[in-house]
Amino acid sequence: MPPARAEVESLQAYSAPLEGRRGLLRLDFNENTLGPSPAVVAAVRALPAEHYAIYPEYDGLRQAVLAALGGSCAGLTPSHVGIFNGVDAAIHAVFQAYGAPGDRLLTTSPTFGYYSPCAQMQGMGIEAIPYTLPGFAFPLAEVSAALAADPPPRLLLLCNPNNPTGTRLEAAQVLALAASAPHTLMVVDELYEAFTGDSVLPLLVAQTGADGDPFAAYPNLLVLRSLSKTAGIAGLRIGFAWGAPALVDRVSRVTGPYDVNSFAVCAAYAALADQAYVDTYVAEVRAARDWLVEQCLAHQVRHHAAGGNYLLIWPDGAVAEVDRRLRQEAGILVRAMTGKPLIDGALRVSVGTGEQMRRFWQAYRLIEGR
Ligand SMILES: Cc1ncc(COP(=O)(O)O)c(C=O)c1O
């Protein structure tokens, strides 16, 4: 076999152990644990077979994405929206479009595990600034200082709220960071913003005049959002990027022309039109998270919960053993954070409905002998 590029030969790829999960209670990938709205299911089922034979079309979808923002879309146009095969594909495209060998990625640690391999495959260096203990606070001073370096980093990837620590950064601070580093492309991964309301988009729109372009003052800012975790269509793969039209254009240039398939497009229309379903699910998750935190407090279980539909729990027993027993004895999947800086020894538990959390808690207490 001819060798791949040197960066690819040495790459430790993002590994998602995704097999054999069906039928189990999946609290390991922060997915929607109920599935999509019935309206989404009906729309996908109703897709005429003729559409399978036709390449997908996207233009009306950009309009629908805008409309779903409601009041916070003034000044935004379809050309501010990029459509990708999941936010993963948007992240990959950002690196392909902007990351050259020797360039630097600035990010935080621990954070979502796909940023680093994307940087490595481009031959980029990585500077990952740790969250601040106790409490995993955002290392604002350190990130600001790193942004001011000469030369500045090529890319800044911020997950807000952060997966897996839940750390939140206020929208005003996100914008201030972007404004402070005009030569760095700043990507804010807002996959979990629905669970906290931390998105930067409403502030961007609010601080722009009625007819202005909200991204005019932030041509280096790209905001990522997806329908995976809230609307329950992770398996169909669709995600969005928001940014200045020129930036969205550059990032979209490196994808294939039809990377997002017709089923995903069809499901996205229906999901975006049923915001009430998402709102109800998000409210249920937030209540279930509060309940689980109360249990942890009452039973003195070390935990950390901030933003997002997940929290960290440190078992007394060996983390791999608790992970294994939850799966084998209770049919519950969680994610061991083994090897992750600052949180080695923790389990990340995705939050679903109240009933699912009660099932998790019962099994966890039994295994931990609490
Ligand atoms: C922070 C973050 N960004 C992106 C993704 C991928 O999202 P998508 O399903 O839209 O590709 C995930 C999935 O776990 C995530 O946690």
Image (cartoon, rainbow, N blue to C red):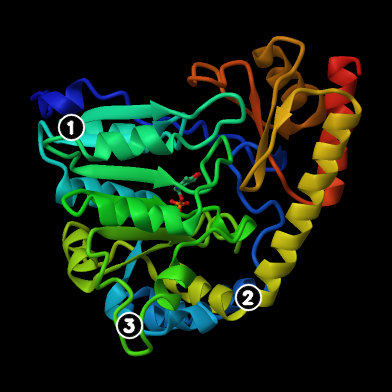
Identified at 63% across, 56% down, the residue is: 195
Outermost residue toward the bottom in this view: 211
Q: Which residue is mark 2?
A: 275
Does residue 147 sit above or below 204 in this rendering? above
Lateral position of residue 218 relative to residue 68, left or right? left
Spatial CA distance of label 1 from label 2 is 39 Å
Spatial CA distance of label 3 from label 2 is 20 Å
Image position, residue 347 (x, y; %): 65, 25
Q: Which residue is mark 3?
A: 77
Does residue 4 sit above or below 227 in this rendering? above
Identified at 63% across, 38% down, the residue is: 21
Image position, residue 350 (x, y; %): 67, 41
Spatial CA distance of label 3 from label 1 is 33 Å
Lateral position of residue 93 relative to residue 193, left or right? left
Q: Give whichever of discs 3 and 2 has the lower sequence position.
A: 3
Ligand 1 closer than 8 Å to label 2 CB: no
Could you tell me which secondary element the residue under label 1 belongs to? loop
Ligand 1 closer than 8 Å to label 3 CB: no
Q: Amino acid at mark 1?
A: Met
Q: Are marks 3 and 1 in contact (CB under 8 Å)?
A: no
Q: Are marks 1 and 2 in contact (CB under 8 Å)?
A: no
Q: Are marks 3 and 2 in contact (CB under 8 Å)?
A: no
Image position, residue 150 (x, y; %): 12, 35
Kindly identify which numbered label has been placed on residue 124: 1
Identified at 24% across, 44% down, the residue is: 155
Closer to us: 152 or 348? 152
- The local crowd at label 3, few if under 14, some if 14 to 19, many if 20 or more residues have their Cα within 10 Å, is some
